[in-house]
Amino acid sequence: MVASLYLDPQIRDWVLFPITLVMILVGLLRHNVTLLLASPPKKQPAPVIREQRALLRSQILRQTSKHSPLPPSYYHTISSSLSTAFQNGTYLKDGPRDPNAPPAPPPNPLADPTAMEGMMDGMKKQMAMNIPQMVIMGWINFFFHGFITIKLPFPLTIGFKPMMQRGINTPDMDVRWVSSLSWYFLNLFGLNGLFRLILGNDNAADSSKDLASSPFASLSGSTPTMQLAPGQDMHKLFLQEKDSLELAEATYKWVGDGIEERILQKYGKSRADTTKRDVPGKQKVQ
């Protein structure tokens, strides 16, 4: 039988609480530093916004085709108008292309100043996240390496032992004991709810957003319309969207089809019952 462990209260006061407090303060500092390093979004030209909005409008029309709120006449008119515009290149920022002209060379994303600014913003955010975490991990490993900080009040399986007892090689210790380094990782992801409560949902201290982010994630810059990768050939995207619109025509269904019959069935009536009441019949003689 494994003997029970008793922690010194000074470990709680000088290890557990300082790690948690430092993690909270670093998260608040990181949020403010990220706001200072972020560059304001630049206003895009109207032709570029027109390109993106046309593509977005087509995607919304296509994705709602199975339960479209638009009547058939409106839907088919808008769909055919967009298909014709995509085919002719009406919404291209440089105007319609000459069909006899040679194909344009692929644009270089590194030559786009907007893409470079987006790349730099992503690298700044990564630095604001990685540098404080590296400092905190070094601080914990130097001062609190091998410390047991807390015992969880609920049972865990043996599979959680590598996650709960990082830096401690004791195969006989109860899984519920948490090491100092594991307590750091638990705070790294467990304090996200506290940061959302203090700073709001859109905060830079939320570490869950950093899992899917990278220095090259925002190459297209901060745009209020759509996020498109640099170097995209909009003419090819418009032609692909035109084909998708034609496929969506086959799956189109107006949400208002048979609405009268559905309402009558919902309230326990049918059209046959209503027509039967309208037909004059024989009245009973009292």
Image: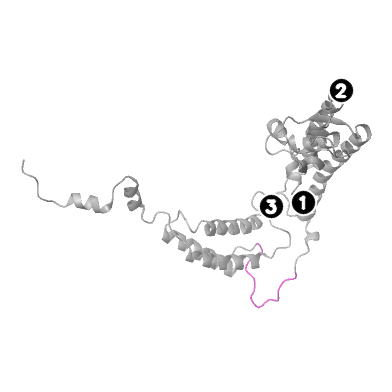
Q: Which residue is mark 3?
A: 44
> Residue 51 in the image: x percent, y percent?
63, 59
Q: In terms of depth relative to the viewer, which is nearer, 98 or 122?
A: 122
Q: Is residue 255 left or right of residue 271?
A: right
Inspect the image, locate mark 1, and give the three-letter code of the amino acid beneath it. Gly
The outermost residue toward the right is 142
Q: Magenta stretch?
A: 93-105
Q: Is residue 255 above or below residue 188?
A: below
Sequence-earlier tag: 2 or 1: 2
Farthest residue toward the bottom?
100
Q: Looking at the picture, which amino acid does disc 3 mark? A: Gln
The secondary structure making up most of the magenta span is loop
Q: Which quarter of the picture shows residue 38?
A: top right
> Closest to the observer: 160 or 70?
160
Q: Nearer the viewer, mark 2 or mark 1?
A: 2
Local packing at callout 1 (Cα closer than 10 Å; few below 14, some 14-19, many 20+) is: many
Q: Quadrant of residue 141?
A: top right
* CB within 8 Å, label 2 to label 1: no
- Look at mark 2 in the image and give the residue it sits on: 8
Identify which residue is drawn at 81% across, 60% down: 110
- Left or right: where does residue 208 sit relative to residue 260? right
What residue is disc 1 on? Answer: 118
Marks 3 and 2 sit apart, C-alpha to C-alpha, by 60 Å
One can see residue 181 in this view: yes
Q: CA distance from mark 1 to mark 3?
A: 14 Å
In the rendered image, which quarter contains the C terminus? top left
